[in-house]
């Protein structure tokens, strides 16, 4: 372990990272946001899930620095009397869980389809790529409407909030896997023509082992880059779906549901309900995208400039 840490400290990856102030700044911001979300139960002043602590008389209180504000609610309260700061911390954790879960699902589907499509016969390749084309024609919103209607009919509107997180992971992951599948397929088409794959075939290794043990490790670099950016896209998709009423319910805070809950009060003077979650969403997505851009440039020698 010590040798691994020593090798990492001397690596070109760390050297290049520390020389890029944008990458360092975005990583620091993302680290602070992620740690704050993980430690939300410990650092949040209030629990937005505890109904006993909510008081409707505290609804729409302004931030603490405003004349009517109070130090108990640093960033004010929403229309239910929830502390905005606490709801943002808990909501960011939900958004990150959905984003990471959706990217994990689309990566599993995309890698499997890409491997089979690239290594298999032309007929299999044609069928799988046509399925991917059909999938791309359906946006995550259309998929959410279709499966959301079925889910609410099966479990009921009241129990929907209990399955909202896995439902969004399923919807977003199912909608975005073709991008990873096409990337993996392109890498597999290039790798399977190389000598080490031909050698593996000559000695009689089964196709599954060649794909998983030899080709797959050499196709993960572009998947890593795409997955980093896809996390930000998944977080944005969750926010958009929640804003449209197709995602997280208002009773369970996420960055999208918080923006939605305060939007109708924005022009009546309660701007903080929407503004602060919106700023946090922008910072979270921006930090992930900037890190993804740096990682793409570093891993692509044709783009990266020292």
Image (spheres, rainbow, N blue to C red):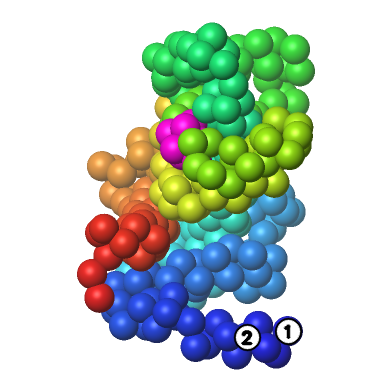
User: Residue placed at 30% from the left, 77% from the top?
Assistant: 20
Disc assigned to residue 193: none
Q: Quadrant of the N terminus?
A: bottom right
- Residue that numbered label 2 is attached to: 5
Q: Quadrant of the C terminus?
A: bottom left
User: Residue placed at 72% from the left, 53% from the top?
Assistant: 50
Residue 124 screen position, x and y as percent: 57, 13
**273 vs 194, nearest the viewer:** 194
Is residue 116 in sight in this rendering? yes
Does the stretch in magenta take in 189? yes
Residue 83 screen position, x and y as percent: 54, 59
Label 2 vs label 1: CA separation?
A: 6 Å
User: Residue placed at 69% from the left, 46% from the top?
Assistant: 213
The picture quadrant where one finds residue 40 is bottom right
Does the stretch in magenta take in 304? no
- Residue that numbered label 1 is attached to: 1
**252 vs 1, nearest the viewer:** 1
User: Residue placed at 63% from the left, 42% from the top?
Assistant: 199
**10 vs 148, nearest the viewer:** 10
The relative height of residue 108 versus residue 66 in the rendered view (above or below) is above
Crowdedness near tag 1: few (<14), some (14–19) or many (≥20) residues, C-alpha within 10 Å: few
Q: Find numbered disc 1 in the image and state the secondary structure of the residue it sits on.
A: loop
Q: Dots 2 and 1: beta carbons under 8 Å?
A: yes
Residue 274 screen position, x and y as percent: 37, 48
The picture quadrant where one finds residue 102 is top right
The relative height of residue 296 versus residue 27 in the rendered view (above or below) is above
Magenta part of the chain: 185-191
Crowdedness near tag 2: few (<14), some (14–19) or many (≥20) residues, C-alpha within 10 Å: few
Q: Find numbered disc 2 in the image and state the secondary structure of the residue it sits on.
A: helix
Secondary structure mostly seen in magenta is: helix
């Amino acid at each position: 372990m010590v040798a691994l840490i020593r090798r990492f400290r001397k690596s070109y990856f760390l050297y290049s990272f520390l020389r890029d102030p944008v990458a360092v700044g975005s990583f620091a911001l993302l680290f602070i946001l992620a740690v704050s979300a993980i430690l939300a139960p410990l650092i949040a002043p209030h629990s937005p899930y505890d109904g006993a602590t909510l008081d409707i008389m505290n609804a729409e209180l302004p931030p603490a620095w405003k004349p009517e504000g109070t130090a108990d609610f640093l960033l004010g309260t929403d229309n239910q009397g929830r502390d905005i700061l606490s709801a943002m911390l808990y909501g960011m954790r939900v958004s990150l869980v959905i984003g990471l879960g959706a990217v994990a699902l689309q990566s599993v589907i995309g890698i499997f389809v890409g491997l089979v499509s690239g290594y298999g016969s032309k007929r299999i390749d044609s069928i799988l790529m046509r399925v991917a084309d059909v999938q791309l024609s359906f946006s995550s919103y259309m998929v959410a409407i279709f499966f959301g209607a079925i889910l609410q009919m099966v479990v009921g509107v009241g129990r929907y909030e209990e399955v909202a997180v896995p439902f969004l992971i399923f919807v977003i992951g199912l909608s975005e896997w073709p991008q990873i599948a096409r990337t993996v397929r392109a890498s597999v088409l290039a790798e399977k023509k190389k000598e080490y794959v031909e050698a593996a075939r000559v000695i009689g290794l089964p196709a599954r082992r060649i794909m998983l043990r030899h080709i797959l490790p050499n196709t993960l670099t572009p998947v890593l880059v795409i997955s980093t950016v896809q996390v930000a896209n998944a977080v944005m998709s969750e926010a958009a779906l929640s804003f449209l009423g197709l995602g997280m319910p208002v009773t369970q805070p996420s960055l999208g549901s918080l923006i939605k809950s305060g939007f109708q009060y924005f022009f009546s003077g309660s701007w903080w309900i929407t503004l602060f979650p919106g700023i946090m969403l922008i910072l979270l997505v921006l930090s992930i995208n900037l890190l993804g851009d740096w990682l793409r440039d570093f891993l692509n020698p044709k783009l990266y400039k020292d």
